[in-house]
Amino acid sequence: MSHLTPREEELALRVIPFPSDANPYGDIFGGWIMSHVDVAGAVPAHRRARGRVATVAVNAFTFKQPVAIGDVVSFYARVVKEGRTSVVVDVEVYAERGHDAPEKVKVTEATLTYVAVNPDGTKRELPA
Ligand SMILES: CC(C)(COP(=O)(O)OP(=O)(O)OC[C@H]1O[C@@H](n2cnc3c(N)ncnc32)[C@H](O)[C@@H]1OP(=O)(O)O)[C@@H](O)C(=O)NCCC(=O)NCCS
């Protein structure tokens, strides 16, 4: 196991993809990873905004390694920048595979921006 993985308190989501999440070549569909990254990134954004947030932008997204059916996929997310109404969140994704000689590899990294919104969907300032 790598000691370079993010801190456990940044763990926002952990999930095992099914065969139905794979593309025709047997790798996990990129859209499955993207949707889970969006959900994971919203966790610290929601916590910081103390309420509802909306994804306004995906600033960067890199698929570094393929994900396989049955991998244990962990999504780590943290706020790296704050604006007036928005927060920028880094999400790092690791896949754990193998039983006898388990390894944990970084498969994806992404940066997204979330905006704090009111119940009617309009933006609001981040609370102090
Ligand atoms: C999020 C939303 C309420 C923002 O409203 P808006 O009036 O367009 O807001 P602004 O253009 O003033 O931007 C608000 C904040 O987002 C930031 N922002 C806007 N567009 C951005 C972009 N492309 N990249 C990075 N940040 C961006 C602004 O810099 C600003 O941050 P700050 O207040 O911290 O300085 C509105 O765009 C919206 O409802 N979008 C749809 C959200 C949604 O449905 N997401 C789900 C995916 S379908």
Image (cartoon, rainbow, N blue to C red):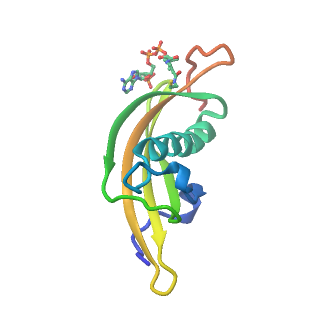
User: Residue 67 or 85: which is nearer the viewer?
Assistant: 67
Q: What is the x, y in percent for residue 43? A: 59, 43
In the orientation shown, which residue stands out farthest toward the bottom? 100
Report the residue at 34% width, 43% height from top. 61
> Which of the 4 image quadrants contains residue 8?
bottom right
Q: Is residue 121 above or below residue 75?
A: above
Q: Is residue 98 above or below residue 21?
A: below
Residue 109 coordinates in the image, percent (x, y): 37, 51
Identify the residue at horizontal 31%, vertical 47% (top origin).
Answer: 62
Ligand 1: quadrant of the figure: top left
Residue found 43% across the figure and 67% down from its top: 5
In the image, is 125 to the left or to the right of 80?
Answer: right
- Using the image, determine if residue 69 lies above or below residue 58: below
Q: Position of residue 105 (x, y in %)?
A: 39, 68
Q: Please state, as top left, top right, bottom left or bottom right, where the N terminus lies in the image.
A: bottom left
Q: Along the horizontal axis of the image, is 111 left or right of 125?
A: left
Residue at the spot x=58%, y=14% of the render? 122
Q: Which quadrant of the figure has residue 103?
A: bottom left
Q: Nearer the viewer, residue 83 or 90?
A: 90
Q: Is residue 121 above or below residue 127?
A: above
Residue 98 locus on image (x, y percent): 47, 78
